[in-house]
Amino acid sequence: MVLKAFFPTCCASADSGLLVGRWVPEQTSAVVLAVVHFPFIPIQVKELLARVQQASQVGVAVLGTWCHRRQDAEESLGHFLEGLGAIFSHEPWLQLCRERGSKFWSCKATRRQAPTCPGAPGEDQVMLVFYDQRKVLLSQLHPPVALPDHQAGDAVAGAGGLAAVFDTVARSEELFRSDRFDEGPVRLSHWQSEGVEASILAELAKRASGPICLLLGGLLSLVSAASACRVFQLWPLSFIWSKLSTCEQLRHRLEQLTFVFSTQKAENPTQLMRKANVLVSVFLDVALGLALLSWLHGKDRIGHLAEALVPVADHVAEELQHLLQWLMGAPAGLKMNRALDQVLGRFFLYHLHLWISYIHLMSPFIERILWHVGLSACLGLTVSLSILSDIIALLTFHIYCFYVYGARLYCLKICGLSSLWRLFRGKKWNVLRQRVDSCSYDLDQLFIGTLLFTILLFLLPTTALYYLVFTLLRLLVVAVQGLIHVLVDLINSLPLYSLGLRLCRPYRLAAGVKFRVLEHEADRPLRLLMQLWLPPHPLLGLPVPQAFLWGAHLPLEAERGQAGLTDPGHRPARHRHTATVSPPPCRGR
C-alpha cells in the first residue's frame, strides 16, 4: 500500500521531534501540521493535542517521528525516537529522516499489527508530498463546510481527496498560534513558529469594524427609508429621479454602502471578496473625488470655468444657427420644398434664440452653481461625473428638442405614407385584430388618398434631411455621455482588490494545485512538491472553492499517472514532471 504523507516545507530544517497532524484513512494520507521538539513531557503533548482537537474539531494526533541528522552525535537519536511509538501509539507509525550532509530523505511507515495477507510486507511504501503551509492556509481552496473527522467518531460522510488536506490546515489555526517566544511547555515548529503574523492596525480595524458597521448600517437604513418615502414617488419627482444620472449614481452608491457595512457576516469567500472589491472601489472613488475637489478650488479654477462656459454656449448656438441657415438654403445642392424648409428653419431658429436668452439669463448664477457642484466631489469622482453628464444634458436640451421634433414629424409622414400605400392596394389596418385586411374604397377616397400621398411623398426629403442632421447631433451628445457613463461604470465595477491580490498575494486567488517531482530515484521515496495553480487571466482569479472540489476528488495515484509516473518499482532516470489538477470549466457562469 502506498501512503501519502503531506509534509510542510517550513519544517524541513526543524530539529528532531514528533510529527503532529491528522490521519485521513479514506485517502491513506497523513497531513503533518507541526513538529514537537525536545524536551517535552508526553502528558503535556497529549493535553495540547486534546485542546487543539476540541477547538478545531480536527483529530490531531502524533503520527510519528522526525529525525534531522545534523551531527555525528545525533546518530543514537534515531533509536530513541523509535521507542516513542510505545508512548504515542498510532497505526501506521511514520518515521521521516533527513540524512546528514545530503538532500536525500528516508521515509518508513511501520505497523504493529500483523498484516492481514500472509505475503504482505510489514511496512508501507511512503510518498512524500511537500506543501507550503502558509499559502495553503491563506488560500480559498478549502471547502466552506466543515469536513467530518472520523477519528473523533463522526459518521457523516465528507469531502475527500485534496480537499481534506486543505480543510485540515484551515481548521488547525489553534495549533499555529504559538511561536518560539511563547513560554509554553511544548515547543512547536510550523509556519508561524518564528513569530505570529499580526498587525496592530489590522487588529484595531477588526475590533472597530463591528461598532462602525452597526452605526453606519443604522444611518444608511434611515437614508433608505427616507428615499423610499411616498413624497418621492409622486410623478414629477419620480420622473426626475429616474432620468438624472446623479440620482442613479447616488442610489447605486447607497446600495454599495449598505452591502459593505452590513452586519451580516459573509457566507463564503466569494461574497467576502465582493465586499472587499466594493469597499476598495468606494475608497478609490472618494480619493479621486477629493483630488478633483482640491484641483477645482485651487487657483480659482471654478471662476475660470464659469467665465468660459457662456462663450462656449454662445459659440455652439452660433454654429447651430449657421447650420439651420444652411439647411434653409440649398444644402449640398439639393432641391428642397421652399415653403416647408422656411417654416421648419424659422421654427428651430426661434427655439435656438429662446435657448440663448435662457443661458444669458442664468449666467450670473453659473459660478455659484459650479461651486456647489464642485463640493459634490467629496462624495466621489463618479458623482461628479454623473453631475457633469446631467449638465451636458441640460446644456444640449435644445438639441434634444430639435431631435424629438424632427423624429416625430418624420414618423408621422412615414406612417401616413404607409397607410396611403395600403389604400392603393385595397387594404387597411384592422385595429381590433392587429392585422391588415382587404377593403373596398370608392372613387372619392382614392382621389383624396392620391393627393395626400403625393403631397407627403414630395415633402418627405425635406423632413428627412432635418431628421438626419438633428439625429447626428443627438448621437454626438449621446456618445459624449456614453463615455462618461463607461468611466463611471469602470470605477464602480473594477475589481481592484482582486487585482491587488493577484499582484501581491496570488496564492489567495488559486484555482487548483499542481505537482512537481523533486526526487525520483531507485530505493528512495518519491518526493513531490504541491504548488498552487493560478488562472492565466487576472480577472479570472476570483476564489471559487466549490470549483476546486471537482479536482480535489482525484486520487493521488491518478495524479502520479498525469505526472508521467508509473509503478514505483520501475524508476527511470531523474527528470522533472508537472501535473496540474484544475477545476473543469464552469458551465452557465
Image (cartoon, helix red, strand yellow):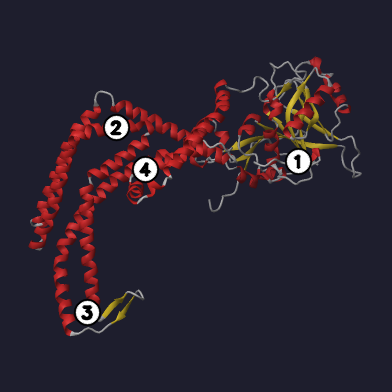
Q: Quadrant of residue 223?
A: top left
Q: Earlier in the sequence, mark 3 or mark 1?
A: 3
**Kind of element beneath mark 1:** loop
Q: Nearer the viewer, residue 101 or 177?
A: 177
Q: Earlier in the sequence, mark 3 or mark 4?
A: 4
Identify the disc placed on residue 372: 2
Q: Nearer the viewer, residue 305 or 188?
A: 305
Q: Nearer the viewer, residue 563 or 387?
A: 387
Q: Earlier in the sequence, mark 3 or mark 2?
A: 2
Label 3 is placed on what type of residue? Phe
- The residue that appears at 23% across and 43% down in the rendered structure is 395
Identify the disc placed on residue 568: 1
Left or right: residue 251 versus residue 519 is: left
Q: Earlier in the sequence, mark 1 or mark 4?
A: 4
Identify the disc placed on residue 424: 3
Q: Quadrant of residue 437?
A: bottom left
Q: Position of residue 237 (x, y in %)?
A: 34, 47
Look at discs 3 and 4 and give the one toward the viewer: 4
Where is 100 relative to 245, above or below? above
Look at discs 3 and 2 and give the one toward the viewer: 2
Label 4 is placed on what type of residue? Cys
**Real-space CA distance between mark 3 and mark 2, rounded to the nearest whole angstrom:** 62 Å
Label 2 is placed on what type of residue? His
Q: Quadrant of residue 293?
A: top left
Q: Earlier in the sequence, mark 4 or mark 2?
A: 4
